[in-house]
Each structure stands twice: as C-alpha cells, then as structure tokens.
C-alpha cells in the first residue's frame, strides 16, 4: 500500500506542477507583470520531469485509482504508461525551456504577441498530453486525446495570420473527423461486451467495464465478441491514426507543424503524435488478446506503416519550406514505428517503442534549433518589423551561425538514420526484426546444385536457398516490405541532405553572429537534446531510471497484456 | 416502474422508425444545395434525436439520468443557427464580444439571431447554391448506407426467418446500421460540400450518429446503479460538441476576415 501511495503521489505531482504553471499563466493574463512568468513554466516542467523520473525509478507493479461509486477507473499506471509519461515530460521540459527565448523574439515580430496566453496554452497542452497515458478508462482516454486536439488548435492559431488560421482550421477539421472514428471504435468495444447472462466472471468483477485493465483480464476478454473488436480496431486505427499522422489521414501534418510556433511544432511532432499512438497501442493489445491471433492487427499496421513510409518519400524529396519537410519526416517515422508494431515480435515492439522516444527527441531538436535559427535571421534581416522572414530566405546558416548550423546538420543526419545516432539504432532494430521474421517464415534451406567439368575435372557447384513453403505470398510480401523500407529510408536520406545543403550552404545575408560556444545560453536546450541524440545512439541508458527494463516490460505488455506481479 | 413487454417492443419499433427518419434527413442534407435548408434539416434531425433519447430513457427506465441527455440535441437545434450566424460575421469581433452574444440570458435563439443580424449580415444568406450536382452525391450516399447496413447486419449475425414482432437482433442491427450510416454520410457531407459551414454540418451529422450509438450502449452490469458507460460516452460527446462549436465561433470569423471567404476553394494558401 505504501508503494502504491508513493506511485500515486508521484503521478499527482507530475500533473500538479504544470497545473500550477497554467494557473499562474491565467493569473498573469490579468495581472500584467510578466517578469516571473518565463521562469515558472520551465521550472514547473522540470519538476514534473523529476517526479516522472522518480516514478520510473520506483515503479514495480501496476497501480490504479478510481471512483468505485461510479464504477470508473480514472488512473491506471503500468510500464507502458510510465514510458510515455517520461517521453512527454522530457520533450515538454526542453520545449518550455526554449520557449523563453522564442517569446522574446515573438515580442518583436508578432503583432498578436500574448505571452501569458501562450504560456497558458503550452501548459494546458503539456497537462493534456501527460494525462493521456494515465487514463485507465478508454472513454476518458478519448476525452484526453480530444482535449489535446482542442488546445493544440489554439496553439497553431497563435500567430493569427492568414496562414496560421488556415492551418488551424484544416488541423481541427481533419483531426476532429478522425477522433469521431476513434470514438466509434471505442463504442464498438462497449458493444462487444456480451449480455450479462453469458459472462458470469465479468459480473463478479463488477467494476468499470470500459477500463483497459478489466477488458484485458483473462476472465473477461474471452467473452468479448470477435467481429465487433475487428471493426473497432479498424476504426481506432483510422481515428487515432489521423491524430498520429498516419497516411492517408496525414494531410494536417505539414499545415499544423509548418505554421505553428516552433516550440509548438516540436510538441506536436515529438509528443502529440505519440499520445495518439499510445491509444492505438492499448487497443492493439486488447484486440490481439480477444482474437487470439495477431494476423489481423499486424496486417493493418504493416499496411498503414509501409504506406506512410512510402508516401513520405516523394513528399520529402520535393522542394519545400523546411518546417513542412520536417512535418513529412513525422509521417516517415510514424510509418516506421507502425511498421515495427506490425511486425509484432518482441524485438520489433522494443524497437518501435524506442523509436518513438528517439524520434521525439530528434524532432524536438530539429524544430527548436531551426526555429531559433529562423528567429535570428528574422531579427538580423527584418530588424524590429512586425513580421516574420520567409523560410525560403533562411540560407547559409553555417556561415551566419556556425554552432547552430552544426547542430542542425548533426540533427538532420540523425533524423534520417545516420549512425552513430539514436534513430539509426531503433531503425536498425526494427529492420533486423523484419529480416528475422522473413527468415523465420522460410523453411529449412534447400540445396540446389549443378555438376560440371572445369579444366578436365568435375566439380559440383551448389547453393542453399530458403524453401518456398506455405505463405509464399507472405514471404514475398516481407521481402517487398524490407525492400520498401530500405529504399525509402535511403531516398529520404538523400532528400534531407539536399534540404540541409540548401539551408546551411551558400551565402549568408549577414556576418556571423556566433563564434564558438561563447554565447551558449540560448543554445543550451538544443545541446541537451543533441547529447541525448548521441547518447541513445550508443546505448539505452540504465542510469537512475531502468529504461531498458521499462522498454522490455512495455513490449511484453503489448504482447501479453498486464504482466504478472 | 417497469414497462410491459408490449409497450417496450412498441417503443423499440418506434425508435427504429425514427432512427431511419434521421437517416432520410441526412440524405436530404447531402443533396440539398441551399445552406439554410441544410440547417433546417439538421434541426429536424436534432428534434427527432431528442425524441429517440426520451424513448430510450423510457425503455431503460432504471437509468432515468438519460432523460437529461435530451437537452443536448434540443440545445443544438435551438442554437445552431445563431452560432453559425455569429461564426460567419464578416468582421473580426473580439472574442469576449462574440461569446457574450451566446450567454444564457439570450434564451430565445431568435432573439440572439435578430441581434446578430442587426449587427452584421450573416454570410450564408449571400452564398450561392453549390455548383455540383445532386445525382452523384445521392448515389454515393446510398452506396455508403448500403455498406453500413451490410456491416451492421454482418456484425449482429443470424436472424430468424419468421417474426411476428421485431426481434431484438434486427433492432440492434438496424440501430448500428443507422448510426454508422449517419457517420459515413456526415463524412460525405464534409468532403463534398464547398463551404466551411457545410463542413461543420457534416461534423455535426457525424456527431448525431455517435450520439444515437452511445445512448443505446448496453447499459452496464446488474447491481450498477449508475450507467457509467453510456453516461461517459454521451458526456464525452457533449464535451466534443461544446469545444468544437466554441472553436468554430472563435476561429471561423478570424479566418473569414483574413481570407474574405468561407468557401473551401478560397482557403488554399497552404500547399505542398
């Protein structure tokens, strides 16, 4: 009980600090003296991150909390929840740290500059995304994801120019349409619960019938109706897949990420997509348990993942504004993660979950660093004009801002899977799992030989080939899948090199404003993210927080459901 | 108080007839080009949904809380027109001023509408009818409805060949089919119509489909005094509607004032 209280206290603290920051921001909207506001948000984010790190360190067994009189399970914490809470808080902290410098620039160039409003929305966004992995009830999970949509729409709208308004409109229409399908899927899960007469064990539980932990209980899920679950998962994938940026529902990505303020773009791409992914993961486990077979969910996820990856390739290769290019990279990486989920083996799931974190860190690095470079260019070229420099005019960053340019170069190469960085590590694990799957589908090797005469001497030349057993079509599919993966990733690498060349090389419009690390303070958030990009390329750290164990347990939860205590 | 089996069956039959009526109205929304007519059809649909909710609450009498749910479609029917009028005003009103126009003391929607009209002409009165025809959208919609029925009846399973009264499985299948049809038709409206108001109407029709689905969710386990699942679903829908309409009232006027239009073809600044 003491441990449960500890865990629940830490969960409460993790949410409490950004709530304090949100309340403070609301107060500052009326008070008007904003000197302390810039400090409150990053400090509260840091404290929330500390609480989550402690939670990850102390966590042992699942914990839940609810309101029994309403048969409602509010909170459910297991390894998967802890992992996603860590992901959210890590990125949210660094972004809130960067937002201090962003708002300084915003004050000069945005006629609709409202720092207290921005801080309020940023903190609300943080809270809603943090709450998603805590939700025990699937309907409350939907509400939490819907709330992230609402708050993020207001953040995309923040600059209130024509482009931002159009982007926020398209964003909310597309994601709201998607979220409706997600609710339809959740409703179908409710409909799959059988009439009371046929589920004696289910009655005995007498608890929240829509809580994930009850639905995946071995006394419950055998009674859920298969056809309803199949249809439910399809709608869940369409619905939450829209929010996760999977093709063909990805159309809001370039507009939303491209027009939002850079800190918001980092959160949208790094964290909000993963919040939607978390919802898909919960239904993925439930559906697999009910169907007693992974083929259905794997097939859908593989198709969605490969389609997203393949579609992102030409979109990244074409000439475009850099933030929109980064948005299409989100499509690519969500496709890779979904592909990993579709493979479904323990290693693939480990790789997919690790990739979610790696992508979050790297994408946050790119959006924040590029945003910083863009704001410096605007300051230098436009002075104090109340407008923003066109992204196409940001050139020669290596000359004008050598340190920032180097961070962008390293981050960009990391983003497209260059070794020895983090994305390469997780992509390699997923690719390796795919190849293992392909080899496991093959039967024992068959020897194919030929006898010939060479130089007067007979010789036998033989080669071993994998045999074509049942599922020849399946084997061909896996070969194609691996080929698509490799070709797409290679072409995307070329695309990023081209975009980085256009951004970093060529003449700069002003003399260099950075020399070495003499003015490191504004670059500190980016250097922290860069250090993580490098660290996770070498290992999955086990310092203070047992991250490998959390990842492994999360993968097992996705396969088996709740782990035994 | 529990209802007799005959009355319960009659109510179930009436619920399904009214649900099918909602489907017909949705088909009307798809093909009607005039925006004001679309809104009237939507209002009629909302009233029918309120009636259905009342009847469902009566059939499942132990969950009297559900009677409260009828206010959601009723409020939508009352306030959708002034809200859309507010959203399409051609000027950049401050948010406080926009929200204050919908405060509770303007109970009569007509009073709100008159006040808004006295301030600025709602744009939809100037909108020309859709240039696209009605045959293809109707045909496509009928295909979607057939698809929805196919899925719903496939889900529920086998049916007896002879029936003197409507069997429970047929009612359940029809209920699912209508709900699914409304969601798909709403999506069709959203994608086919040319203006932003119609996009919103498409979203609201989809919401009606989900509402219909949610109020009929198997209502909990014996011993549960509170139908937590159906209440949670309807409350989540309510949250969704409120938030979406607030954003509509905030976002659309700004977009309108910047782009000068609420037609979708005029919102193409972002490309690539």
Image (cartoon, rainbow, N blue to C red):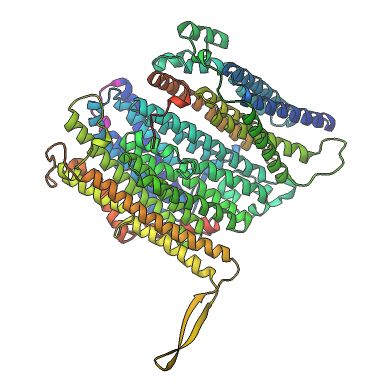
In the drawing, does residue B230 fall left or right of residue B12?
Answer: left
Q: Kindly give the residue lying farthest to the top in the view shown.
A: B118
Q: Position of residue A562 (x, y in %)?
A: 53, 55
Question: Does residue B186 belong to the magenta stretch?
Answer: no
Q: Position of residue A162 (x, y in %)?
A: 36, 25
Asked whether the viewer can see residue A224, the reply is no
In the drawing, does residue A325 fall left or right of residue B74?
Answer: left
In the drawing, does residue A41 fall left or right of residue A138?
Answer: left
Asked whether the viewer can see residue B170, the reply is yes
- Relative to residue A243, is residue B11 depicted above or below? above
**Nearer to me, A358 or A61:** A358
Q: Quadrant of residue A261?
A: top left
Q: Position of residue A260 (x, y in %)?
A: 35, 34
**Nearer to me, A105 or B231:** A105
Q: Position of residue A147 (x, y in %)?
A: 47, 34
Span colored in magenta: A31-39
Q: Kindly give the residue lying farthest to the bottom in the view shown.
A: A456
């Amino acid at each position: 009980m003491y441990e449960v209280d500890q865990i629940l206290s830490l969960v409460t603290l993790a949410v409490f600090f950004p709530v304090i920051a949100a309340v403070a921001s609301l107060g500052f909207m009326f008070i008007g003296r904003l000197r302390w506001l810039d400090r409150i948000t990053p400090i509260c984010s840091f404290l929330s991150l500390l609480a989550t790190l402690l939670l990850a360190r102390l966590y042992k067994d699942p914990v839940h909390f609810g309101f029994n009189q309403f048969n409602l399970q509010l909170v459910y914490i297991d390894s998967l929840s802890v992992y996603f809470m860590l992901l959210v808080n890590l990125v949210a902290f660094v972004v809130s740290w960067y937002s201090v410098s962003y708002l300084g620039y915003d004050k000069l160039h945005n006629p609709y500059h409202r720092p207290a409003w921005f801080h309020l929305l940023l903190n609300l966004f943080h809270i809603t995304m943090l709450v998603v992995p805590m939700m025990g009830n699937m309907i409350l999970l939907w509400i939490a994801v819907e709330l992230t949509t609402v708050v993020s729409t207001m953040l995309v709208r923040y600059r209130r120019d024509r482009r931002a308004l159009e982007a926020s409109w398209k964003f909310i229409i597309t994601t709201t349409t998607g979220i409706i399908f997600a609710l339809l899927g959740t409703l179908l899960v409710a409909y799959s619960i059988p009439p009371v007469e046929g589920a004696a064990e289910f009655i005995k539980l007498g608890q929240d019938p829509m809580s994930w932990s009850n639905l995946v209980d071995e006394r419950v899920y055998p009674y859920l109706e298969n056809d309803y679950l199949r249809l439910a998962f399809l709608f869940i994938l369409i619905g939450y897949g829209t929010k996760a940026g999977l093709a063909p529902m990805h159309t809001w990505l370039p507009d939303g990420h491209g027009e939002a303020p850079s800190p918001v773009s980092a959160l949208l791409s790094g964290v909000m997509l993963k919040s939607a992914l978390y919802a898909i993961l919960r239904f993925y486990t439930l559906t697999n348990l009910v169907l007693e077979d992974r083929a259905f969910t794997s097939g859908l996820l593989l198709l969605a993942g490969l389609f997203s990856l393949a579609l992102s390739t030409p979109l990244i290769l074409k000439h475009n504004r850099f933030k929109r290019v980064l948005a299409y990279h989100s499509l690519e990486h969500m496709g890779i993660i979904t592909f990993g989920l579709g493979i479904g083996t323990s290693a693939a799931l480990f790789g997919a979950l690790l990739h979610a974190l790696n992508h979050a860190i790297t994408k946050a690095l790119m959006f924040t660093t590029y945003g910083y470079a863009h704001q410096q260019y605007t300051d230098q070229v436009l002075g104090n004009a109340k407008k923003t420099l066109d992204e196409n005019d940001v050139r020669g960053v290596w000359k004008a801002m050598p340190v920032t340019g180097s961070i962008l170069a390293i981050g960009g190469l990391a983003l497209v899977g260059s070794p020895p960085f983090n994305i390469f590590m997780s992509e390699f694990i997923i690719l390796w799992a795919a190849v293992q799957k392909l080899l496991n589908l093959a039967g024992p090797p068959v020897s194919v030989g030929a006898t010939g005469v060479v130089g007067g001497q007979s010789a036998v030349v033989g080669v071993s080939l994998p045999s074509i057993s049942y599922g020849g079509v399946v084997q061909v599919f896996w070969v194609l899948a691996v080929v698509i993966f490799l070709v797409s990733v290679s072409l995307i690498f070329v695309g990023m090199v081209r975009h980085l060349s256009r951004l970093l090389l060529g003449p700069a419009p002003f003399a260099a404003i950075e020399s070495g690390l003499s003015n490191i303070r504004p670059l500190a958030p980016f250097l922290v993210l860069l250090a993580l990009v490098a660290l996770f390329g070498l290992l999955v750290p086990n310092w203070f927080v047992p991250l490998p164990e959390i990842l492994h347990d999360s993968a097992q939860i996705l396969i088996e459901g709740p782990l035994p205590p | 108080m529990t209802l007799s089996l005959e009355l319960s069956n009659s109510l179930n039959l009436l619920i399904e007839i009214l649900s099918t009526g909602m489907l017909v109205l949705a088909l009307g929304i798809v093909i009607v080009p005039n925006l004001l007519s679309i809104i009237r059809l939507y209002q009629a649909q909302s009233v029918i949904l309120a009636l259905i909710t009342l009847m469902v609450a009566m059939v499942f009498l132990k969950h009297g809380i559900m009677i409260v749910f009828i206010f959601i479609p009723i409020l939508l029917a009352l306030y959708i027109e002034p809200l859309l009028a507010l959203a399409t005003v051609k000027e950049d009103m401050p948010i406080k001023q926009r929200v204050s126009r919908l405060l509770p003391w303007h109970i009569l929607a007509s009073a709100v509408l008159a006040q808004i009209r006295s301030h600025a002409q709602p744009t939809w009165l100037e909108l020309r009818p859709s240039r696209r025809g009605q045959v293809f959208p109707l045909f496509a919609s009928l295909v979607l409805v057939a698809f929805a029925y196919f899925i719903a009846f496939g889900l529920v399973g086998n049916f007896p060949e002879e029936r003197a009264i409507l069997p429970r499985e047929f009612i359940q299948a029809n209920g699912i089919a209508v709900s699914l049809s409304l969601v798909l038709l709403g999506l069709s409206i959203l994608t086919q119509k040319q203006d932003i108001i119609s996009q919103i109407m498409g979203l609201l029709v989809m919401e009606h489909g989900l509402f219909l689905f949610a109020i009929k969710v198997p209502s909990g386990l014996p011993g549960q005094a509170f139908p937590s699942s159906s209440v949670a679903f309807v409350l989540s829908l309510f949250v969704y509607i409120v938030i979406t309409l607030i954003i509509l009232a905030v976002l659309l006027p700004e977009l309108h004032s910047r782009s000068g239009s609420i037609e979708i073809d005029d919102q193409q600044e972002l490309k690539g």
